[in-house]
Image (cartoon, coloured by chain):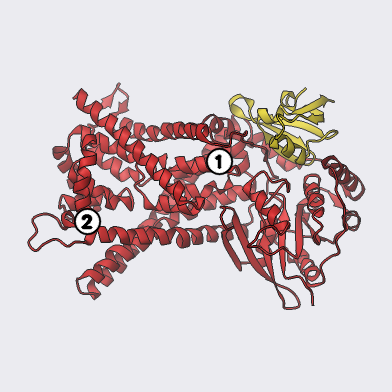
Amino acid sequence: MFLSQLSHNQSAIVDTVQAQGTQDTIAQRLSELGFVAGEQVRLIGRAPFGGDPILVQIGFTRFALRLSEAERVVVVGL
Amino acid sequence: MSSIQHIALIGNPNCGKTSLFNQLTGARQKVANYAGVTVERKEGFVNLPSGRRLRVLDLPGAYSLAATSPDEAITRAICLGEMPSEPMPDVLVCVVDATNLRLHLRFVLEVQHLGRPMVLVLNMMDDAKRRGIKIDTAKLAAHLAMPVVETVALNKQGIDKLLVLLDAEPPTVVNRGVTEQSDIHQQVRAILADAVVMPTDTDRRDDVLDSVLLHPVAGLLILATLMFLMFQAVFAWAAPFMDGIEAGMGWLSDIVATQMNDGLLKSLIVDAVLAGVGGVLVFLPQILILFLFILSLEESGYLPRAAFLLDRLMFKAGLTGRAFIPLLSSFACAVPGIMATRSISDPRDRLTTIMVAPLMTCSARLPVYALLIGAFIPAQTVWGLFNLQGLVLFALYAGGIVSALVVATVMKYFQRDKSAHALLLELPSYRLPNWHNVALGLYERAMIFIKRVGGIILALTILLWVLLTFPHAPENAALPAIDYSFAGQLGHALVFIFAPIGFTWQICIALIPAMAAREVVVAALGTVYAIAGNDEAIAEQLGSLVATQWSLATALSLLVWFVFAPQCLATLATVKRETGSWRMVGMMTFYLFALAYLAAFITYRTVLALS
C-alpha cells in the first residue's frame, strides 16, 4: 500500500521509499525528511479540491505531500 | 584569546534560527544577496562578554546538505568552505527546535560529518516544557559530543551561556567517519530513546487548530476571510499614508518652487528628483502593510497551511500553493507581490510567479480603467441584472488572471529543467508571532525597497524627465511643450507602430511618461490635450473630451493595452532586484509588450469590424 492510499487518521509503518528513475531527488528528500523503514506515519488530512496534497504526521513533524510524492512511499498498515 | 572570529547559524527551516540571529545581533544586521544568486545573505555582529566582536552569518535553512534548492546549495558550500567570497566559519552553531528533534537531529548528525567544530542550540525550550517534553541535555551532549545550550525565544538566559561558549576556544571535533543515511536515522532513534522523553508526538494545540484551519470548507472560508481582511487593510490603511506622502512631497515641491527661480534646475529638482523620491516613497505604505500581514502569517505558521489548501488549484496553473499570496498581493501592487515570492523555494516556480505577477490588475490601473470606462461604456443594465460598466471592469480583471494562467502554463512547457516540482512542505507548529522579528523583517523589506529598487526608479524618473524636457518648445509655441520634447517626437514616431491598434499621437505621447506609473497616463493625457487643473478636474474634463475625440475601438484597445503593458518602472526595477538579472527584466518587458500589442490589435480590429 502507498502512503497516498491511507484513510483519514490511519497509521502505518514505512516500508520503503521507491525512487522513480535514477536521479530522484524527491525520493532522496523524502528519506531525509524521515520517511525511512520502520517509521510510523499517520494521515492527518487531505486538501480540498480532490484531496491532493495530503497532510502526513511523521515523527514529530507534519508534512504536506502531493499525491505524486506520497506514491513513492510504500507503507504497511498497522 | 579565543580564535573564534566568525560563526554561522545553521539549521532546518522553522527551527527558530532567524529569531536567534535577531536576538544575537539586534539591529546590527546587513542583508544582501550572495554573489551571483538571489539567496538572501544575512550577516550581523555580536559583542562577547570579553568585549570581542564576533561576525555571525545566518545561513539559509536546510533539511539536508544534499542540496535540492539554491538556499541549500549555499549553506552546503559555506559549511565546506567552498564559497570563494565567504571565509569558512570557525564554529557552526546548529540550531534545533526542541519539539522537533527527530527531524532536526538528523541534520545535526549530517552536518557533524563535515568535521567542523559545532555547538548545539536547543531552541524553543519553553514550548518543549509546556508539552511536557523532557530532554536530558547532559546525555544529549555526550551522545553528540558537542556542547549543548538551551534557549527560549525572548529570553536572554540561554543566549548568555552561548556567548560564554563562543568566547572560549572552539569545541573539539569528533570524527564520525562516513555513515549511511539509514544509519543516521538509527543513531537519532537511539539518542532520542536515551535522552528525550516525549509524552505525545503532536501538540494538542496544533491538532485542534489544524482540524479547523485545514478543514476543506471551514479552512477555505477562514482563508478567504483572512485574505479579504488583508486586502481591505492594504487599501484602507495605506490610502491615508499614501495621500500624506503625496501631500508632503507636493508641499516640499511648492516650497522649492517658490524659493527657486524658474529654470532647468528647478524643473530638475521638482519634476524629476522630488517626483522620483515621491514615486518611490508612495509604495512604502502598501509594502509595509502587506508585509505586516505576510510576516505575521509566516511567523505564526499559517502561511504554509494556506499553501497546502490552495496547492491543487495553483498546481493546475503550473504554479505552486506558495505562489498564492504573492499573486494576491499583486492585485494591490506587483512590487510587494514580487518581493513576497521569496517564500517560494523552487526557483522555477518562483520565476514563473514573478513573471505573471504584473498580469494581476494592480490598483494603479484603476484610474485609467475608471476614466475610459466612464467615458465610453454606457451605464446600462445587461440581462436585467448587471451593470455594463461593472462587467467591462470585471472582464479586464479576468483577462489578466486568465492570461497569467496561460503564461504560466507556457513557461512550464519551455523550462529546460523538467524534473518534478516538489511540494514536500513542512507545516510547523503554530506560534504567536514574535513582534521583534516582524518589526525587523518589515524594516529589512523597507530598506531593500528604498535602497535597491528606489535607486533604479529615481534614475529612470530623471531619464524620463530629460526625455520630456528637452529640447524646449520654441517661443509662442502653438502646441503644449511636451509636443516638442524627445518624448513628444518619440510619441509622434511611435504612431507609426501604434496606428494599427488605433492609438492617436496624443495617446502615444502620454504612454511615455506613463512608463513611470500607469496612473500617470491620465495626467499626461491632460497635458497633451492642454487641460489644466488638479487630477480630478483633468479626469472629468478628459472623460468628456476623449469621448468625442476617440472611437470606441480606440478606447477599448487602450483599456486592453493596460491589462498587459509593463507600464511600470517600479515593477521592472523590482524584478531586477529579485532575479538579479537584466535578461529576465528584458524578457518580461518584451513578452508583456508583445501580449499588450497583440491583445489591443485584436480588440481594435474586432470592434472596428463590428461597428
Depicted B433 relative to depicted B84: above or below: above
Q: Is residue B335 visible?
A: yes
- Mark 1 Cα-neighbour bin, 10 Å: few <14, some 14–19, many ≥20: some
- Mark 2 Cα-neighbour bin, 10 Å: few <14, some 14–19, many ≥20: some
Depicted B315 relative to depicted B448: above or below: above
Residue B450 lies left or right of residue A24; in this view the side is left
Q: Chain of mark 1?
A: B
Q: Is residue B227 visible?
A: no
Please tell me whether mark 1 sits on a helix, a strand or a loop. Answer: helix
Q: Chain of mark 2?
A: B
Report the number of numbered marks: 2
Depicted A29 relative to depicted B44: above or below: above
Q: Which corner quadrant holds the N terminus of chain A?
A: top right
Residue B122 x %, y %: 79, 56
Residue B201 lies left or right of residue B315; in this view the side is right
Residue B313 x %, y %: 54, 30
Residue type, numbered disc 2:
Phe
| Badge 2 and badge 1 both on one subunit | yes
Please tell me whether mark 2 sits on a helix, a strand or a loop. Answer: helix
Residue A39 x %, y %: 83, 35
- Rounded to the nearest angstrom, the CA distance separating label 2 from label 1 is 40 Å
**The colour assigned to chain B within the rendered structure:** red
Q: What numbered label is drawn on residue B388?
A: none
User: Toward which corner of the image does residue B495 lie, by quadrant?
Assistant: top left
Label located before the other in sequence (2 or 1): 1
Report which residue position mark 2 lands on: B486
Report which residue position mark 1 lands on: B348
User: Toward which corner of the image does residue B148 lie, by quadrant?
Assistant: bottom right
Residue type, numbered disc 1:
Arg
Q: Which chain is yellow?
A: A
